[in-house]
Image (cartoon, rainbow, N blue to C red):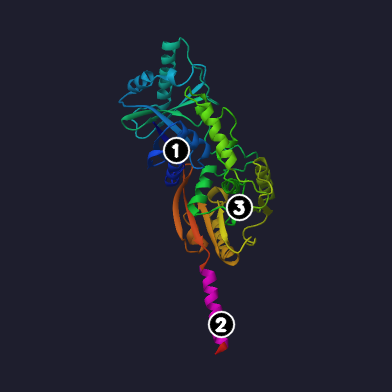
Amino acid sequence: MNNYFATCPRGLEGILTEDLTACGGKEVRAVAGGVAACGNLEFAYRVNLESRIATRLLHRIASADYSNEADVYKLAYDTNWPQLFSVDRSIRVYVTAIRSPLKSLEFITLKVKDAVCDRFRAETTRRPSVNTKNPEVRIHLFLTDRTATLYLDTSGEPLYLRGHKLAKVGAPLKENLAAGILRLAGWQPGMPLLDPMCGSGTFLLEAAQMALDDAPGLSREPGGFGFEHHKNFDAGLWYRLQREVAERRRMVDASLMIFGSDEDGDAVNRTRQNLAHAGLDGLVVLEKSDLLHRLAPAASGMLVANPPYGERLGNAADLAAFYPLLGNALKQHFTGWHCWFLSADTQLPKLIRLQTSRKIPLYNGALECRLYGFDMVAGSARRKRDDAKRQDALEQ
């Protein structure tokens, strides 16, 4: 059994725990920014192949206390890197620190790289090349105030890079954050879903793949995962797991009850291109429409959106004018719907003039946000009561 650490957007650790457990992880434990677990190679391959929430899966290699740069160099040099990957593989070292007493992370990055190369040179008379853009092997060093831990990255490129987005918009939502929001909101395949500010279609792509049980890692090209460049790579096991999840994918030829719209026609076209590239064209209903005026596509369902806020929309006056209109549109057109908005604007609940049903802290990158939930059922119940009262009055 190996020790692993899976990273994810902050706020999604609980859901990632479910993913790692489902993939066969043992001793699964959530901490801020990720989840630790024990597992075998099949566990590592399954997380990379199937988790929609993980950003990376890191294999813990070595750990020790340290007080200076020399201690970290020794830890890296004493690690048997030639046993883990070939000298012919290109490398890059990444360093992350929390309360570390070391003054320069750039310097310690160079020290770790030197230690790895020195160990290879001592055993093979050769050293691996460094590739800062597209390395085959990624080595991560994590520093606390007194502990240094080395990891091998099993994922390579971040797992949220599904490979489906040819056309993007500015500041797009990460795919694993979008998938996490859908799960936090309680969306299930078959439930009508609408993203009325679809941008490049991140929510729609994730929902459609969830509905089809389409494993996100299947779209990655051969050699795209970090573990494929490690010496313990089990090609037979990997190909068996790929076949297993590919055969599980549902085949449909009708709408998935997933809807998207945007007031920007170019955004709708970008979403259509991305859906087609992912093999999902015809399964999601798209239209050009302004949220303030569009009607609900079903009697009940879930609305989810990442609305403009802060610099993306404009000044405070723009926000103060927009959100009350949004609240009115939801009350008029989306009775019976559960509506969710991701926003860093703490004024949203007050300005939208609706009662929040849930408020979940999340991070969109380094930006602290809230996922606000609004259940648009009270208005319907109130109208029924009012109608009943009017009927009673007529009968008296």
Q: Which residue: 37% across, 29% down? A: 149
Q: Which residue: 48% across, 30% down? A: 154
Asked whether 363 or 101 is in front, the reply is 363
The alpha-carbon separation of the residues under discs 3 and 1 comes to: 28 Å
Q: Residue furthest top?
A: 125
Q: Amino acid at mark 1?
A: Thr
In percent of width and height, residue 58 lies at 44, 32
- Answer with mark 3 or mark 2, whichever residue precedes in sequence: 3
Q: Residue furthest bottom?
A: 396
Q: Find out whether the residues at labels 1 and 2 contact each other: C-beta distance under 8 Å.
A: no
Q: Find out whether the residues at labels 3 and 2 contact each other: C-beta distance under 8 Å.
A: no
Residue 61 visible in rendering: yes
The alpha-carbon separation of the residues under discs 1 and 2 comes to: 57 Å
Q: Quick one: SS at disc 2?
A: helix
Asked whether 323 or 82 is in front, the reply is 82
What is the span of residues highlighted in magenta in the rendered image?
378-394
Residue 159 visible in rendering: no
Q: Quick one: SS at disc 1?
A: strand
Front label number (3 vs 2): 2
Note whether 387 is above or below 60 in the view shown: below
- Answer with mark 1 or mark 2, whichever residue precedes in sequence: 1
Q: Amino acid at mark 3?
A: Met
Front label number (3 vs 1): 1
Q: Amino acid at mark 2?
A: Arg
**Residue marked by disc 3:** 197
Examine the residues drawn in magenta and state their main secondary structure: helix
**Residue marked by disc 1:** 7
Residue 390 numbered mark, or none: 2
In percent of width and height, residue 43 lies at 45, 35
Q: Which residue: 49% across, 22% down? A: 91
